[in-house]
Image: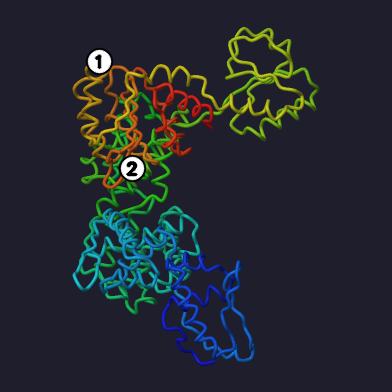
Amino acid sequence: MSSKVLFSSQRLAYLFDTIKNETLPQQELANRFSVSTRTIRTDISALNGILSDYGAQVDYTKNIGYQLVVTDPILYATLPITQAIERIPRTSRERVLALLIAFLTQSNSVKLDDIAGKWFLSRSTLQNDVIEVKQYLDKYNLLIENRPYYGMRLVGDELSIRTCLTDILWQRHMAEDFIMVNRLRKTVLNDIDLEYLEKILQNQLERFELKLNAEGQGYLLYSCAVSITRINQGHELLEYDVDQINTTVISAVTQISEDVSYFLGSVLSDAEFNYLCAQVISRTVMESPNQAQSLAMVKHILSYINDTYHYNLLEDKKLNQDILIHISSMLSRIKYQIRTTNPLLHEIKKYYPFAYDITLSALANTEKYTGAKMTEDEISYLAVHIGVALERNYSAGHERCAQILLVSELGNAALRMIEAKIKRDFPHIKINRTLSYREYEQLSNIEEDFVVSTVRLTKKNKQVVKIAPFPTSYQLEQLGRLAMIDRKMPYIIERFFSEKFFLIINQPMTQEELFNKVCKKLEQMGYVDVDFYPSVIEREAIVSTLLGENIAIPHSVGLLAKKTIVTTIFAPQGIVWDKNQVAYVIFLLAISKNEYEDAMRIYNLFVNFVKEKSTKRLLDSKTFNDFRAIVKDSFGRLS
């Protein structure tokens, strides 16, 4: 068969490919291609004009739709190979990624009208996607420049472009989106042989005993692949200086440079050699020339957490070792201006705000160690280490298992069956002890969170849940609900939430005006001093306190309040919070050192609001009592 372009436009080619594979109604086709049903009918007529020469036609059946009918199979078999069908991004997320790749890889200007035509979209829809693209590129100091009559093009330095491309590839890899990774290998890396490149890196790193964790090695692979592709496309670095390079790294990179000549036709230039050295140094676990600086920074962070938040992690040897290794590599990255991304940044900020905020506060004044402002990605990596240490030492900032006392007079087999049922259905419940009725009666005090019993008991200091030998679904539901309720939560609700600090704001207001209004009231009522307001402003300037689902939790740097209180603010019109983002539900936290342990449990509530997408439900509250009912209900489902 001859190969030629059969259809006059990509839309016709895509329409034929779609109808060839499935029968679809007229309206569904119109929706898929973002055109009117009239345009679909016109396109079908054009298709039939072409297909009539090849023994086929597209028929329409009422209540069923369009389908391809082959009237002459022999003639249809002579249908020429049609042009390759370009995959059209359908969702906003897919379009943003496709636009990012277009701007980052094309030397010529990008014309939105051309892309809108290819993707069967309106220009206005595409312009909304470009706004997201600009926000993403802004993190890398990359700009999109409008050129009248020519289109739009990317403006920025080569290092930033390489970092951005590497991050995109690595994020897709970490998300295990291997279909997209394979597509990006073709569009971004020109189908480079990643497996061979990986062997080169692995052989030389092992030969010279340079230790990289799996994540560091994976990122280095994509970074090298991007560099090779960019060099082959004429974007070679002309200048890149490094100092204090470990001799082992120099030897390893020398061998890697010779090996990658397979892809380049020559060894790396001096600038590219230095750049690769910096990439290896920044991801290698090794004795750092910054060791004294790293140790000082570790001590500063842990001392700050101890002095400010009263969590003593100074003697945690595992934490000291883990963050020393991370900080040593981090200082090298900062020194050589190598950006790193944390694919889980959003999840860490959203679901572990407590650990993240402690880390953020501890790092607020570390520029004397780093010489530069730390990124959210670096902060979030350290937050994971600190969060794990808090859990290990204090069970802080994380949900704890509910501990129960099981009382039963049943035989061993029946008892084991109940234990297995509880463990299987409620993994967040730990059976601490199993006692007989007599043993229970001899106890003066119950240490567990509550008691589960198959016999009727006298209530002591903890609540008793009676279940049958074969628990009903209702009994299990009650058991699960009770296990999810933190025993201190009712006390916390009454103590830290107050009708006096419950506001519904219906008029337009800026973030600064809101902070000023609330902080003045807190100061007047003796909860904070004059230094609280500027500290809230300072904390917001470091990183936005917007959690997700338009819920924000502004607070001061450190624990400055005299007494703990949460000011609850509902703003149905929204308050601009961070660039183009808006907060509708705001919890301004004033937390004192004396009540920090209990107050930190409130973070679990905010995380649950985000998980349950509770913003609309919260905004429906007309009174403080409405809000309090939602809080109690949400606490009841914490798990």
Q: Which residue is mark 2?
A: 379
Q: Position of residue 512 (x, y in %)?
A: 21, 34
Quarter where residue 602 is shown: top left
Q: Which mark is residue 589?
A: none
Circle 1: residue type: Gly
Q: Position of residue 328 (x, y in %)?
A: 32, 46
Q: Position of residue 634 (x, y in %)?
A: 49, 29
Left or right: 452, with 346 as reference point: right
At x 34% / y 61%, what residue is drawn?
125
Q: Are marks 1 and 2 in contact (CB under 8 Å)?
A: no
**Circle 1 residues within 10 Å: few <14, some 14–19, many ≥20:** few
Q: Which mark is residue 526?
A: 1
Q: Residue furthest front?
A: 62
Left or right: 72, with 566 as reference point: right
Given residues 160 and 44, the one toward you in this image is 44
In the rendered image, the vertical position of residue 500 relative to residue 422, given as above or below: above
In the rendered image, the vertical position of residue 167 relative to residue 386, given as above or below: below
